[in-house]
Image: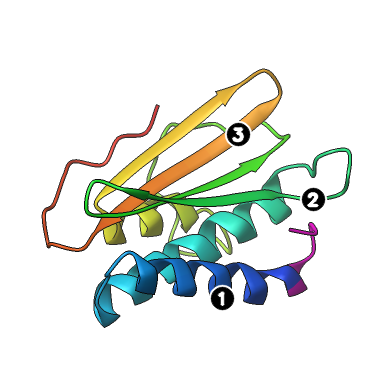
Amino acid sequence: MPARTSSARAARSIVRDAATEAGLEDDRARDLILATSEAFANAIQHGRAWANECILLTTEPCGGGLRVEVTDCGNFDSRLEPTPIDATSGRGIPIIAAVVDRLEVQNGNGRTLVRFEMYAAAEMFASTVG
């Protein structure tokens, strides 16, 4: 996806269609779309685009649900610390962690990967960041 804020709409549409195909119901699909918006916005605001000026967005079915990955060429401090009440940013990863069934953040080799999953059944798995 082009590394522009205007691409967020297309990213949400892609995930909405994939969530429907994966059998996610309305509320769970909406939460996955919210997580996608946050991850994509973080990649644009805090990350760095690939050489082709894009952010990589992938979706794939997984264990009764859908996996979404957003990858950029930046570095991310994956320690979750409380965000000051008056801060204007810093809530994206905690929001994602709150609404998905599984979260993983990987840093290294000049890349940040944010991977999250939502399952069709309301199985709640511990979110991990590392």
The residue at the point 62 percent across, 41 percent down is 71
Helix, strand or loop for disc 3: strand
Q: CA separation, marks 2 and 1? A: 17 Å
Q: Secondary structure at mark 1?
A: helix
Q: Residue 33, image x and y in percent?
A: 44, 70
Question: Quick one: 26 or 4, which is closer to the camera?
Answer: 26
Q: Indicate which disc residue 25 carries.
A: none
Residue at the image point whose x is 30% and y is 35% from the top: 128
Pointer 1 residue: 13
Residue range highlighted in magenta = 1-6
Question: For mark 2, does the 10 Å Cα neighbourhood hold few (<14), some (14 to 19), or many (20 or more) residues?
Answer: some
> Mark 3 or 2 closer to N-term?
2
Q: Nearest the camera: 32 or 126?
A: 32
Q: Where's residue 105, x and y in %? A: 46, 35
- Vertical placement of 25 versus 32: above or below? below
The quarter in which the N terminus is drawn is: bottom right
Q: Position of residue 26 (x, y in %)?
A: 28, 81
Q: At 72% across and 49% down in the image, what residue appears?
A: 55
Of pointers 2 and 1, the one earlier in the residue sequence? 1
- Residue located beneath label 2 in the image: 54
Q: Please state, as top left, top right, bottom left or bottom right, where the C terminus lies in the image.
A: top left
Residue 118 horizontal side relative to residue 82, left or right: left
Q: Is residue 108 left or right of residue 115?
A: right
Residue furthest bottom in the image:
26
Residue 27 % position (x, y): 26, 78
